[in-house]
Amino acid sequence: MVGRRICLRAHQISIMPTSPPIDLPTVTIPCYRCGYDVRAQPVNGRCPECAASVADSRRLALIPRRPAWRDADPRWRRRILTGSWILVLMPLMAVLQQFQWTERIPAPIFYDVQRGQSLDESCFAMVYLYFMFCIGLVLLFSKERNRQPARLDWTQRWGVTGSYGVLLLGIPAYAFIMALVIIGIAALLQSMPLRYQPAVTPLLVKLGTGYVYYGPHPTLLAEASLACCSSIVVLLACVPLFNALRSSGPRVPAGIVLAPLALSAVVQVGYVLAYALHLNPVPPDWVGNHFFYFNPEALASWFGDPGRIFFHGNVIAEAAKWLACVGIAVWLTIAQISAICRRRRLVRTASKRNRSTGTQEALTSR
């Protein structure tokens, strides 16, 4: 009787459903929301701290935190490289004006086509610096795919917002003049007899007077805000630039290359605060030359007279910032060329391997 019970108990134990073994990885799997270690939790479970999905945390754990440049998002690489070269071209208009080449370059015009206009007379020469700054910085703040979220990802949205803010703060000095010109044209049209006035006259009156009444005016406060906003945006742009440089090389040289841009931004913000608080340490020439982070006129003046102006403080600061931009652009260009060559080499090797495999299979089938 006892032996029969033992056999029955052994049979019941043998037919009991067995749970699959739990795979406990040795690497920590942090929760993507709160950082709690969820490696002991089931795959379809939830984080005990914030109720986030464990499956999503495991999936994100497989994505590298900082992939190498050759393995990073190709779209992000192209945009970072384009933005860095756009920053290199910031002093181009000032250099052309220094050598008076803008007077010889024709520019498109929508009125008085027979006379035409030069690049120096066009509005593009006035807003070139702000447009290039906005386009280059927005490209630097592009979103990178196929990587884990980082703590400083908030700099992307604030950097893009600040870039457009710099564009809006830089245009009022020229937009106010354009509004006055529009008002003058409208007044000239209104001086004509009513039957000969064009239909666009009321629209010109509303546009010109509307901007004068409600648009931003070129005041000292707006210019100081422009200097502060542009410096903060450049300081935020050092984060994606550092990520791009360290993904293609060592960290220490990357920090050294970015040091002139970051230090100049910090000094610029300090000058703006001192100017806003009416403190004495602000140099007297800063008001006229430092209402923007980049001052390409100082760098262009060196091309006009290299021997006499080189040791000026503004020229040295602008040269350091411009050389830093050139170094970043050259660094990333070399890394991009290396990544493209490596990809082509891998594609060529894979095609040769597939070709040899197909030949062996054809010989085997014969």
Image (cartoon, rainbow, N blue to C red):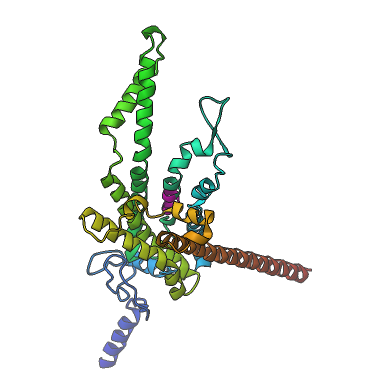
Give the residue displayed 46% in from the left and 65% down from the top. Answer: 244
Q: Quadrant of the N terminus?
A: bottom left
Asked whether 292 falls inside the magenta stretch, the response is no
Measured from the top left, where is residue 138 in percent x and y? 41, 52
Give the residue displayed 37% in from the left and 41% down from the top. Answer: 171
- Relative to 312, 278 lies left or right: left
Question: Can you say whether 107 is above or below 308 in the image?
Answer: above
Q: From this viewpoint, is residue 83 visible?
A: no
Measured from the top left, where is residue 258 in percent x and y? 42, 67
Q: Quadrant of the C terminus?
A: bottom right
- Relative to 164, 80 lies left or right: right
Question: Can you say whether 17 is above or below 143 in the image?
Answer: below
Point out the residue furthest to the front here: 308
Q: Nearer the viewer, residue 267 or 349?
A: 267
Measured from the top left, where is residue 174 in percent x and y? 38, 38
Give the residue displayed 34% in from the left and 34% down from the top. Answer: 176
State which quadrant residue 358 falls in.
bottom right
What span is in magenta?
133-139
State which quadrant residue 268 falls in.
bottom left
